[in-house]
Every structure is written in structure tokens, then in C-alpha cells.
Image (cartoon, helix red, strand yellow):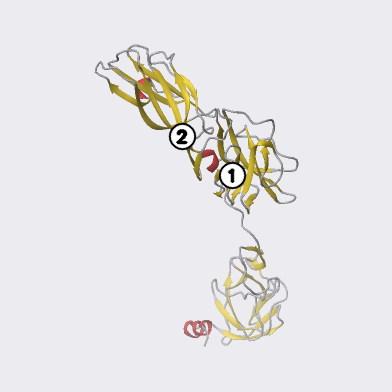
Amino acid sequence: MSNLTQFLYKSGVPIAAAAGTVDAITVTYAPAIALADQLMVAFVSTGANTITTPTFAPNGLTARTIVKRGGVALVAGDIAASLSISLLEYNSANTRWELLNPALPPNTAVTPGAYTVTSLTVDAQGRLTAASSGTVSLPRNYIGGLGIASAADVTNDITIAVGEARDETDAQDITLASALTKQIDAAWAVGTNAGGMDTGTVASSTSYYIWLILRSDTSVVDALFSLSGTAPTMPTNYDYRRLIAFVRRNGSAAIQPFENQGDVTWYVDGIGDVSDATITNNAFETGTLSCPRHCLAFITAGVSNTTSTNPYSTMYVRAVASVAAVANAQGINSINMGGTTFDYLYGRATIKVDGSSQVEYAVNEATGDATAEIATMGFSMSTRRDP
């Protein structure tokens, strides 16, 4: 005995065999029913309905339309095949019958089987009408792998590890399936062990951004070096890009040796970016660091003085355009020298640079003979993770 049959048996809901047609159903209940709101009856079907507006007329009463789910029209097959049981409830306010157990007719539009990364189509009745396997795009800003390392020619070449990233417009996935080596001292050309400069010629003491690029019409993925951290010059037909790394070309016309792990890069030797012997006591000045725009720079900063005796010396570093007063800026050193001449005093800090890779620094010291120094030791490249 089915659950529905048990329910009908225990609740005393009238049930009888249907007559008429599958779309104009009549039933004779004994004893005869009297219509009342929420009256429930059941019948044994003679076949599935073929139209969306079948009617029901028990005991010779006026035929009323059968609907479902609060007034939704039926679809063909909602009243199931012959000998199935349909349960109805009368809605007196709308003079209609509600089908409480609409059937789910076979869906020939969907082939039985397992679907991976499925795309589904559901009709207005809430039924599955189509299914297909496909692919899911990477999440917005996603980047995985794509680390960089020095290549055989450590002076000019870098190798990009395999990986994938979502392009900066969140429109395309870019997948680098094989490691790629690019040359900073040659004009861009497609392929590994080929030139990488987007435009112009490489210069010393200059910063370069590394972009992963995609030509969507051929699915070719490559990379290039650019002075720009926002708008590199793209090769013809390459239409998608993602910023993935940064290198510094040093004063010896070579890529500054580095170690890279995802967003974080450490220089093997720090780069001296600021050496200012003409400071004004407590006056902030601007210094440009060897790191990407808007990154967190890892710095060593200090004060040197070999010409006079100082009772104290303090160096401050802050983000550009900070509203903090000197007393509230980030202190790198706060040292009371007690009247002793000092050579060099330093400390380390992490500081956010602006869109031009700049910070502000100031020195508080007694005699005005100090030299302010800042060396960039590395950085965390936030624009790689969130372009």
C-alpha cells in the first residue's frame, strides 16, 4: 500500500474511479459529496491529461478547472497515467480544483547520465529540461602559480612557472601550460626564449612590470615586460592580460637578483633608494622605492652621521600624503645617543607606497648633519592579487 493510499484510507478522503475523458474528468462518489472550501477528494485516473486546463465534475456538479500550486496551469502529464491516484482540494474562493500531487512526466530532453560542471535549464513549471557538461570560470582576481625565477641568463631573462589567472577585466581565464622564459633586453616576440619588451629598449636603474597576455582567437598565452603597471603596450591581436610580477633593472644593467614566492619578492641584496644628506630637521621629503606601485615595501631605514656629536636621532617613514604629524608617523629609529658620535643606526619596517612607489621620510636630529637612508629589501605585491 503506497503512502498516498494509506493517507486516503486513514483520513476518509472519498476516492472513486474516474470517468469521462482524460481532460474532462467525471467521478461519482457514494455518498455524494457537497462542495465546501478545502474539501479533499481523490480519483483513480484513466490516463494522463493532454491539455493545460482539464476539468473535474464530481457527482454531476459544475465542471471546474484543475490547477496546481495556487493557480498555476497544469502541463500535459501532471495528471498521471492510467490507474494512478490524483488528489484534489476544492478552492471555493476561485471556484477551482487544486491538484495536490502533480506527476513529473518523463523528460526526454535530458539524457540520463552523470554530468560534470553542469549547466541546467529549468522550465516555468520547475522541471529540468536540459543539462550539459561545461567549464567553470576562475573566480574574479584569481591567480595561482605563475611565480618567477631567474633564467640561465640571469642578467636579462626570467622564467615564469606554469599557472593560471583570471584576466583583469574578469572576462577570460588565462592558463600558462608550460614554463615560459622571456628576455628583457629584446623586443617582444611570441614564444619561450624570445624577447619580452613591449616597446622601447631596456634601461638601467628602472622598474618593469611583467604581464601575462592572451590572444583569444588562437588561445596563445605569452608574457611581456612593460614600464607600465596599468596599461602595457599589447602585441597585435593580444586582447587579455593580467599583471603577475615585477623586476628591477639595476645600475649594472642587470635584473636585480631576487627570490619570489607568489605575491612576495625578496631582493638578494637590498637596493639603496634614498641617501639624503641635505635633510631639514623634522621636514618630510619624498623618496621613490624599487618596488611595484601600491605595494607593501619591506625596507631598512636609518640615519648616519660621522661628523658631529648628537644627543639623539629619530627617523620617520610614512605613506605619501599621510595627515599624521611627525609624532604620529611610523618611527624607524628613536635613539638617544647620550652625546656619543654615531656612524649608522637603522631599523626595519613595512610601509605602503603610493601609485608612484613613493613614501615620505623625515629625520629629527640635533645638529643637521645626518644622512637619511632607505634601502628596499623586498615587497608584497598587492596589485598582483587584486588588480
Kind of residue indicated by mark 2: Asp
Q: Is residue 194 above or below residue 37?
A: above
Q: Is residue 260 above or below residue 19?
A: above
Quadrant of the frame with the C terminus: top right
Q: Position of residue 364 (x, y in %)?
A: 35, 17
Q: Quadrant of residue 80?
A: bottom right
- Foreground pick, 306 / 322: 306
- Foreground pick, 103 / 314: 314
Q: Which residue is mark 2?
A: 269
Name the residue at 65% across, 83% down: 45
Q: Which residue is mark 1?
A: 152
Q: Is residue 381 visible?
A: no
**Mark 2 Cα shell of 10 Å, populated few (<14), some (14-19), many (≥20):** few
**Mark 1 Cα shell of 10 Å, populated few (<14), some (14-19), many (≥20):** few
Q: Are marks 2 and 1 in contact (CB under 8 Å)?
A: no
Q: Is residue 26 above or below residue 203?
A: below
Name the residue at 58% across, 37% down: 155
Q: Quadrant of residue 56?
A: bottom right
Mark nearest the camera among 2 and 1 is 1
Q: Residue furthest left?
A: 338
Q: Is residue 356 visible?
A: yes
Residue 373 left/right relative to 333:
right
Kind of residue indicated by mark 1: Ala
Q: Is residue 10 above or below residue 138?
A: below
Name the residue at 36% across, 24% down: 328
Q: Position of residue 82 (x, y in %)?
A: 66, 85
**First in sequence: mark 2 or mark 1?**
1
Q: Position of residue 258 (x, y in %)?
A: 50, 39
Q: CA distance from mark 2 to mark 1?
A: 19 Å
Q: Position of residue 130 (x, y in %)?
A: 68, 67
Q: Quadrant of residue 208?
A: top right
Element type at marker 2? strand
